[in-house]
Image (cartoon, grey):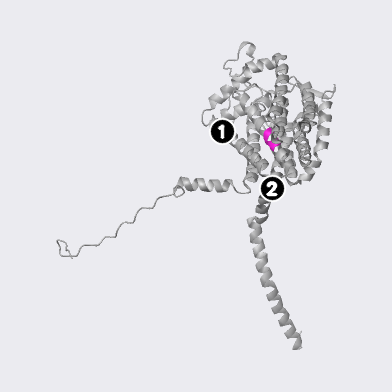
Amino acid sequence: MPTSRTGRPPVQRAARRPALARTPHDNPAGRFVTRARRAWDRPLTAYYLILGGSLLITVLGLVMVYSASQITALQLSLPGSYFFRKQFLAAAIGGVLMLVASRMPVKLHRALAYPMLAGAVFLMALVQVPGIGVEINGNQNWISLGGSFQIQPSEFGKLALVLWGADLLARKQDKRLLTQWKHMLVPLVPAAFMLLGLIMLGGDMGTAIILTAILFGLLWLAGAPTRLFVGVLSVALAIGFILIKTSPNRMSRLACIGATEPGPHDTCWQAVHGIYALASGGFFGSGLGASVEKWGQLPEAHTDFIFAITGEELGLAGTLSVLALFAALGYAGIRVAGRTEDPFVRYAAGGVTTWITAQAVINVGAVLGLLPIAGVPLPLFSYGGSALLPTMFAVGLLIAFARDDPAARAALAMRQPRFGRKWAAVRGSAGAAGPRRWNTMRRRASAARSSGER
């Protein structure tokens, strides 16, 4: 045996083990991706995204309405919190409607479809009656409720078209009639065009575009063939082109796409100052309440252009957060529509998702100068109770549909509040110990009586 220079035997070193190949899931990034996928695929993911996303958008919208409307209220000799208080009241009522809609069964939602459509048509026709309809910013689409409260029936027409169209298509699918193009178009398209006609009588083309998007969404979900889809789209585009071409106001809005200067007679003033507000915000904004454009420079700062004030005060981080919330809400709606086997749930969830997503895209696109200014509010975010109430009810629909999923229903049934579990455990332990203590007392009492003591 060989020895070292010191005379001691050499130390035997253990052979190195071959290095094992690391799988992609062993590194932190892989583990994070795996956990994210598992959380994303859980049954309650869509439920929490819809509930949490809608509430966050509404709360952040209340904050921005308060910040963006103070100067406008003071210019009108009103208290600074005037518009905020009205929006807060509408949000409270909308929260009750959302809760009620989320707890209603699907059958009751379907039963409300026809009465809601009839009520929306009646109110939209009532708008055109002289002395009842109110004109605001050139559009006569409002009904005065007394005082400072007004209602816009066309906003409820969106919800009515979603519910009625979903119920109609579901009934026809159950009877296997959607394979015929006549049953797919009639009476859905004529009823939608009737609503569009009533809206356009008041001159509100922005709401008409949203209603058209809902109609196309329902037809797409129903599996309309490409030729039929293109035909309806061509008719809608032709009508829209005629309506824009014959209106100087709409032509001027179309000419303001991508404008960087107000132009002659300040025709692009609102579009340009919306870009100024976004550009001055930077990455993190100038601070909540520190907007400059809301001091009379940007018209409709708390309604149609509240996204611009958000960009100025909260910066790119704030606007991207709002867009991320809308993206999560849209994804959750698509997931609910894609995983259900109930045709009514699929059509209604798809219609609501199309409505909210299309309206958000049109509003943000107009603020960014990529689309013409359509005069539609940012859903759940802009000031306006008439738009907030039906939208929150529609969100309640999505929550009800997400809860109605069998896997989600089972997961909710297994979950109890932490306080409830502790109280149940305390009651169980007390119940387990109670009978033994009571029996012991009974034995002692019986023994006492047998000995003659009282």
Q: Which of 104 and 447 is in front in this view?
A: 104
**Residue 203 sits in quarter:** top right
Please give the name of the residue rendered at 66% of the width and 35% of the height, measured from the top-left corner. Answer: 62
Image position, residue 162 (x, y; %): 74, 35
Residue 250: percent from left, percent from top: 69, 17
Residue situated in front as seen by the camera: 454 or 449: 449
Label 2: which residue? 403
In magenta, the rendered stretch is 350-354
Q: Is mark 1 on a helix, strand or loop?
A: helix
Residue 68 image offset from top left, x and y in percent? 63, 28
Kindly indicate whether the residue at mark 1 contacts the one at mark 2 (C-beta within 8 angstroms).
no
| Label 2 vs label 1, nearer the camera | 2
Crowd tier of the residue under label 2, counting other residues whose Cα lies within 10 Å: few below 14, some 14–19, many 20 or above: many
Please state which amino acid type lies under the numbered disc 2.
Arg
Answer yes or no: is residue 152 visible.
no
Q: In this view, does 287 lie to the left or right of 88?
A: left
In the picture as drawn, the residue positioned furthest to the bottom comes out as 451
Q: In this view, does 107 lie above or below 443?
A: above
User: Would you say the magenta stretch is mainly helix, strand or loop?
Assistant: helix
Q: In which quarter of the image is the C terminus?
A: bottom right
Residue 358: quarter of image: top right
- Could you say where residue 291 lies in the image, as x and y percent from the top left? 58, 27
Gap in angstroms between the C-alphas marked 2 and 1: 29 Å
Kind of residue sitting beneath label 1: Leu
Q: Quadrant of the N terminus?
A: bottom left
| Mark 2: secondary structure | helix
| Residue 320 badge | 1
Q: Is residue 284 above or below residue 234?
A: below
